Image (cartoon, rainbow, N blue to C red):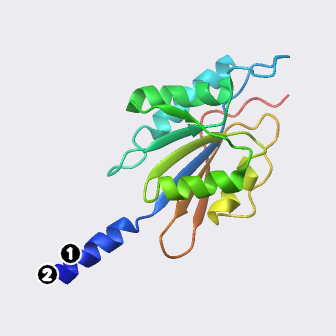
Amino acid sequence: MVLALGLAFFFESQATTTVIVVRHADVVAALGEDPGLSPAGAIRAEELARVLVEVDVDRPLKAILVAPGKAYRETAEPLARRINLPVQEVDSTDPDALANWILKKYKGEIVLVVADAMTIPTLIPKFQGSKRVPDLADGEYDNLYVVSIPWYGRVKTLRVRYGSRPAPL
């Protein structure tokens, strides 16, 4: 009985970590260095909240991590309000350090990261996820990556689309 409880505790403590990575939603075409979301971006942020509000039936999202800036925060805020979780600003300029911190602090949890188009293709491989994440085009805001990091075995990277795609120019 003690052995069974010990094994159950061990395997539970070695649970899968899931990192969901999205780009900030559509931004206002502005001259400023810190633009907010456009009306289409605000709709996309609401859609992200709808998609992720019950992302796991057993365990809720544990953290919402965003790069510094209005667009990142505004993308995460609808979800944060729905699940009553604070938005945490993190330094995304060092993807290696960010990935290591997430894996250490949120082991076995589900975490959302809202990042920029240049960080995403470099961050996902830091979790031992796919090294073939394509660069994101300027108007491409609808990618949602799910990186499933088991305590043992192969990391899986899934890419899904959410919200509507902008009309081609």
Q: Is residue 92 above or below residue 11?
A: above
Kindly identify the amino acid type of the residue bearing the numbered disc 2. Met
Q: Is residue 63 above or below residue 152?
A: above
Say if residue 34 shows up in the picture: yes
Which residue sits furthest left?
A: 1
User: Which residue is located at x 49 percent, y 39 percent?
Assistant: 51
Q: Tell me the SS state at disc 1.
A: helix
* Residues at circles 1 and 2 in contact by the CB criterion of under 8 Å: yes
Kindly identify the amino acid type of the residue bearing the numbered disc 1. Leu
User: Residue 112: x, y in percent?
Assistant: 54, 44
- Compared across the picture, whether 160 is left or right of 28 comes to left
Q: Which mark is residue 5?
A: 1
Which quadrant is home to the N terminus?
bottom left
Which of 125/92 is in front? 92
User: Which residue is located at x 52 percent, y 76 percent?
Assistant: 153
Q: Which residue is mark 2?
A: 1
User: Residue 67: x, y in percent?
Assistant: 66, 36
